[in-house]
Image: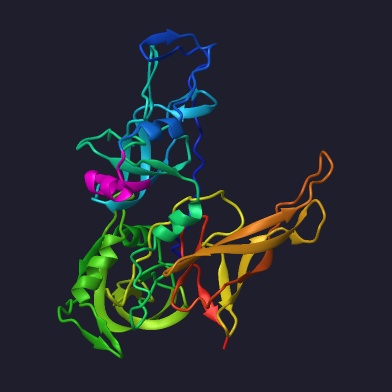
Amino acid sequence: MNLPLRRSWVVVKLSLSALAAGVVLAGCGGSIGSSTPVAPARHTAVAASCAAVSPAQQFAIARLVFVGRMLPGATTSFGRRQVLGSPATVRVLRYLKGSGPRTVKVITAVTITHNGVSAGEDGIEPQVGEIWKIYADSRRQPFDTSICSGSTRIRSAVRVALDLWSGFSVQARPRPIIPLGEGIVIDPSTGFPDEATKQAYEEGRFVLRASLPNDSGRLGSFPVISGAEAYHRLRALGRSLGTPVPPLVVRAVRLGTATFVTDRGKRRLPAWQFSFKRVAKPASVLALAPPDLFTPPRLEQLGLTGTGNSIEDSATTDRSGTAITISFIGAAAGSGPCEARYTASAVADDRAVAFTIHTITKSGPPGTICSAVGYFRTAILRLAKPLGARVLISSSDGGAVAVTPTH
């Protein structure tokens, strides 16, 4: 029996927890009962009292500058907002200055203790799920920050999606390959004979019984990495599953080609083929390296989940490159309560075009139940200038979508 290996995407739903309604709020040196609302720090007023520092100076002064999404944590009612207390946890989407871990903690405008809440005048007031650009001055976590130092909420997720692709060399010739789908490693197409063999592959638990070519060379028009570098890539994808299993024997390594999914459709590209004992077909590791290869950024939840994302969507362009037909899964066509119409819009820069799918529906009468059947739908995105070498990305997760040109 051959067991297929499937890498699937998992959507994790996070639940929010708020403080009890009886929390005591304290600020400005005094204690205020929970029945008395505390006015939030007025960012416009505080900003006016901040020292006159230009954005360039704020960037130069800060030790770290990053864009991140606020994760769930303890919150309290602060005026009319449910604000995260210190220290708030942030998942970093991109470091704009400096570097650091994927998840960090920052100080906000409120500190929650068992005695109440203390408030800072120019602290940030983030809510769960918001995206913020943080300017951090301190050396250790939780990072100290404020609106006077430049920290601000980013209201447009589309701009965040575009910023994720700021490192793409759109003018490079040849255009860099952007791998999608399985990425830079294609698993054996025939699957595995048993669970132990499959687990060994997933963990990157191998024993070499073949030589690894150390010399880099060329295949066609592409320079290629060595077999040793490809082996490192193959093992780097492994993750421990806990249960010890025998290693998978690598019995042959050779340079060939394989068909990879890219943001410009399927392409036959140089690949190192790793053959395993008791596995019928080899694994293929993409043999390209920068600048011919561009590794796409991680997918992020930038907008609401739903219609329009890089995992399920695909697109085709007309001959001019200005009309893009985006294909996705949606509701049935029509104007009824369980039907929908779709339109597409985009925000673009020199490197990428970030699209958004808009859903137009009609509310049904109370008690209307719609089936969970998905339908293949399309929406046409019209651009002011041709897509060209730019990347088409989803504004909901920042991921690239495969575009097939019309010939």
Q: Is residue 350 magenta?
A: no
Q: Nearer the viewer, residue 233 or 136?
A: 136
Question: Residue 372 at what x, y percent from top left?
Answer: 70, 52
Total numbered labels placed on residues in the image: 0
Quadrant housing residue 126? top left
Q: Quadrant of the C terminus?
A: bottom right
> What residue appears at the point 21 percent right and 66 percent down from the top-left corner?
207
Q: Position of residue 335 (x, y in %)?
A: 81, 57
Give me the residue at 47% from left, 34% from top: 127
Residue 66 is covered by the magenta coloring: yes
What residue is drawn where x is 53% and y is 12%? 36
Question: Of 141 and 333, which appears nearest the observer?
Answer: 141
In this picture, residue 274 sits left or right of residue 25: left
Residue 218 in percent (x, y) is at: 24, 87
Query: What residue is at 21 percent from the left and 35 percent from the top?
Result: 140
Quarter where residue 280 is shown: bottom left
77, above or below 370, in the image: above
Q: Which residues are magenta?
A: 52-67
Pick whichever, 105 or 353, lies toward us.
Answer: 353
The picture places residue 362, in percent across and down from the top left corner, at 79, 51
Q: Is residue 306 above or below residue 220?
A: above
Residue 198 in view here? yes
